Image: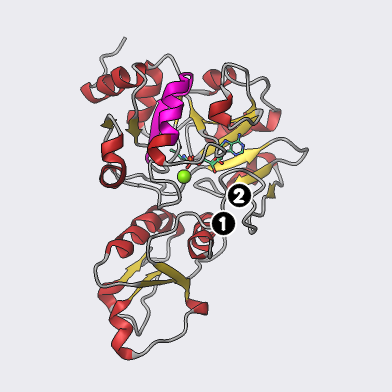
Amino acid sequence: MAEIGQDIARAKSILTKGGLVAIPTETVYGLAGNALNDQAVTSIFEAKNRPSFDPLIVHVASLESAAEYVEFIPENAIKLANTFWPGPLTILLKKKSIISDLVTSGLDTVAIRVPAQELTRSLLTVLDFPLAAPSANPFGYISPTKAEHVNAQLGDRLDYILDGGDCEVGLESTIVSFEHEVPKVMRLGGLSVEEIEQVIGPVQVANHSSSTPAAPGMLKSHYAPRKSIVLKSKFDQISEDKISEIGALLFDQFDEVIPKENQFLLSESGDLKEAASRLFLGLRTLDQHDKIKTIVTDFVPNIGLGRAINDRIKRATAKS
Ligand code: TXA
Ligand code: MG
């Protein structure tokens, strides 16, 4: 067997003992533990302060490995997996009993994905168990796209952070369910609906506009920064002496009134892929900016990854 790096060896040793390791993925960093070890799974929920009704995604090295944990893989799921794995796609499939109810919050389906990030792929291939991993942020807060984000918020609750640099995609995986005849996108994410439809034809997209989500965890007010964040269209202009307290998270053009140093552009060239990769960084940066009290934001073009970006903006600006 090829020699593995020291960092991967360390992660493997900790995970094998039931410890928690933050892992880089191409979407966001994950807070990983052995998915077959109930004590490890319990400690993931505790570290994140995550309610036990919100199930975890199980990460595996390959489609073959996924097959060990599910009863059946429908044709369309195989097509998607063959096309987009490793990558930002999560599929919901009937679980085998080896996956405990703790992981799935009592549901009979398990969310499975094969991540693309190189270090985590290597790690998964040297483990003899899959990794349960939610995004490595405290429950309800902005997902981390750099190792330092994880360290700042969960560092003391983790045994190790496997540093893989910046997450390339920057939005969580797209979740697809095959429960009904027409496949359904349960969470918009780093793989666009258009790309999915090119492979399996038309799909439905779940509507999570209510605060009683159809799928657990799809809560309306998610990804929220600590500061108040409002849509530009709903924002009442304020007096000039308060303007230095306003920040802006915008797509490709600066606001003319708000001080430039308070603004974060997602992509100056208007590229949705770049915008997706910088969304959580932008939210975080403005949330931590000393002078800013209120963040103003706006939707991006609603195509491709723009739909997933707009979904996150909607949730961040939703009043709980
Ligand atoms: O990109 C990602 O998916 C990242 C990286 C780390 O893989 N993970 C991630 O996990 O975003 P998390 O826990 O933050 O979001 C997982 C979502 C939750 O909204 C959860 O409710 C949903 O997946 N989910 C998990 N299992 C499910 C199931 N069996 N049925 C329906 N929804 C499920
Ligand atoms: Mg999350």
Taking the magenta stretch, the answer to whether it contains residue 69 is no
Kind of residue indicated by mark 1: Lys
The quarter of the displayed image where residue 267 is located: bottom left
Image coordinates of residue 63 in percent, x first then y, are 55, 23
Q: Look at the numbered disc 2 and give the secondary structure of its residue.
A: helix
**Is 52 displayed left or right of 181 in the figure?**
left
Label placed on residue 193: 2
**Is residue 220 shown to the viewer in this render?**
yes
Q: Residue at x 60, y 49 (%)?
A: 193
Q: Which residues are magenta?
A: 29-45
- Look at the picture and state if 135 lies above or below 294: above
- Look at the picture and state if 138 lies above or below 86: below
Q: Look at the numbered disc 1 and give the secondary structure of its residue.
A: loop
- Of the 4 image quadrants, the one containing the N terminus is top left
Q: Residue at x 56, y 34 (%)?
A: 83
In depth, the one of 78 and 10 nearer the eye is 10
Q: Which residue is mark 1?
A: 220
Q: Residue at x 64, y 30 (%)?
A: 109
Q: Residue at x 39, y 87 (%)?
A: 238
**Is residue 25 shown to the viewer in this render?**
no
- Look at the picture and state if 4 lies above or below 30: above
Q: Badge 1: how crowded within 10 Å, few (<14), some, or many (20+)?
A: many
- Closer to the N terminus: mark 1 or mark 2? 2
